[in-house]
Structure formats: structure tokens, C-alpha cells
Image (cartoon, rainbow, N blue to C red):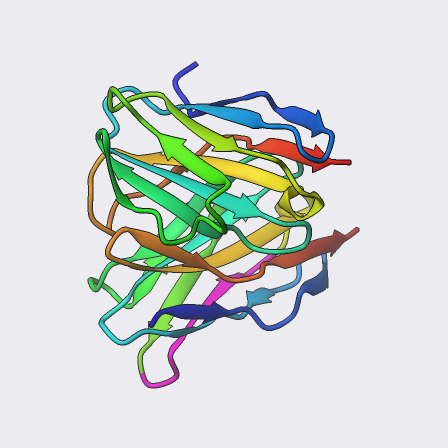
Amino acid sequence: GAGVSQSPRYKVAKRGQDVALRCDPISGHVSLFWYQQALGQGPEFLTYFQNEAQLDKSGLPSDRFFAERPEGSVSTLKIQRTQQEDSAVYLCASSLVSGNTGELFFGEGSRLTVL
Amino acid sequence: AQSVTQLGSHVSVSEGALVLLRCNYSSSVPPYLFWYVQYPNQGLQLLLKYTSAATLVKGINGFEAEFKKSETSFHLTKPSAHMSDAAEYFCAVTNFNKFYFGSGTKLNVKP
């Protein structure tokens, strides 16, 4: 399809496992964002890419979280040694332009449950 | 610093009644403001955005919002609620590519 695609949609991990979440943005979109949405909360910013450059990673909660976008298209959010507090929906969004006037197009999210 | 406060985590209206969802923002610079809607198990979808043009912004599905600088508000309204409007609504403010979202308001529409 033409929208933002995320996989897997659902992931159950045992505490201590590593997980990788994939985001396929809309083709040609310059900006890519990752957000974390805990149950009953609004999305919280994690990190931002402009093409392949990670310009802002101030929202990553710990050094267990790592994101990359090596070719300026697909992005992967990796969480090492998962903890129960990492359970959340991870949303990816892309935007055609850089700058804060661009509309964000969101994927359906990857729901991570850490047991 | 930028932040958004949404008053009321749950709002319930009757079908055909006025919808009013409240959003107040804090921003050290002229803000860009957005309303997004989220249906169950779906991503967020843009309803409307304010980017310093007209203060009354019209969006999709009959929604509109008015930017009031003196009140630091950007409330979302719709004259007549429809059952299909039941969803969660998020207000957001941006600063240099970082979007700050409110905690959301779940709208319930009663028949």
C-alpha cells in the first residue's frame, strides 16, 4: 500500500530478549519519527531522522534503545534486553518535508508486550 | 519548552450534539498546532493543523478548531456529532521537528 507500514504488528517478548521493530515509510518522505505510546497515554517522542541522519534521539529512554535508517528509507528500532516497562505501542511516522509544518503520516504501530 | 494539556480524558455526547474537546498549549515560540484522531488499532490520522495563517481552521469530517493566543487554546469542535466520530483525539504542538502530544480525549457518542 501507499501508507506507512510497520512490522510486526504484535510482538511478545520475554524479559531480557532483544526485539527489532521495522518501519517502511511512504516513499520519498524525508522525515521519519519513532514514538512510544503507553496504554492510555499520548505518543511520546523517541527519535527523528532526516533522510539517513539521526538528528534527534533525545527521547530514547535508555541506551538499550537504538534506531537506524541506513539508506534513508526503512528504519529499525531495536530494543535490547527488554524490560516490562518497555511494553507499549511503538508508532512510526513519516513526513514529506523537514520542519514542523509537515503533516505526519502514522503507521498502525507495533504493540510490544514484555512478559 | 512546548507542552499540551487536554482537559477531560473522556467526553460523552449524544448523536447530533455539539462536540467540544479542549486543548491548551504552552510554547515559547509561535506554535504550530495539530489535532489527530486515532481509531482502535489504527495509527493517528491528521484532522487539521494551524500554521499561523487563519485562526479558525477547518478540517476533515466537519471538525474545526480555533487558535486563541490570549487563552493559549486550540479547542476542537464539531456542530453535530455522528456515531462514526467515536475515537480518541490528540492535540499536538511542534517545535523543530519534535511533536508533543497531549494525553488524549476519548470521545463516546451515544445514540
Farthest residue, direction top: A1
Q: Is residue A109 visible?
A: yes
Q: Residue at x 28, y 22 (%)?
A: A70
For image coordinates 29% across by 21% down, the residue present is A73
Residue B28, x across and y down, in percent: 27, 76
**Residue B33 part of the magenta-drawn span:** no
**A57 on left or right of B85:** left
Question: Residue B87, percent across and down?
Answer: 64, 47
Residue appearing at x 23%, y 72% in the figure? B29
Q: Is residue B78 magenta?
A: yes
In the displayed structure, would residue A10 be above or below residue B99?
above
Tell me the magenta residue range.
B70-80
Spot occupied by residue B51 in the image (x, y as percentages of width and height): 24, 59
Left or right of A42 in this view: A49: left
> Which percent across, then down, holds residue B21?
56, 66
Q: Is residue B59 visible?
A: no
The relative height of residue B98 versus residue B45 in the rendered view (above or below) is: below
Depicted A13 relative to depicted B60: above or below: above
Quadrant of the rendering where the N terminus of chain B is positioned: bottom left
Determine the image quadrant of residue B27.
Answer: bottom left
**How many marks are shown on the rendered structure?**
0
Residue B108 relative to residue B2: left or right:
right
In terms of depth relative to the viewer, which is nearer, B49 or B99? B99
Q: Pick the residue in front: B79 or B47.
A: B47
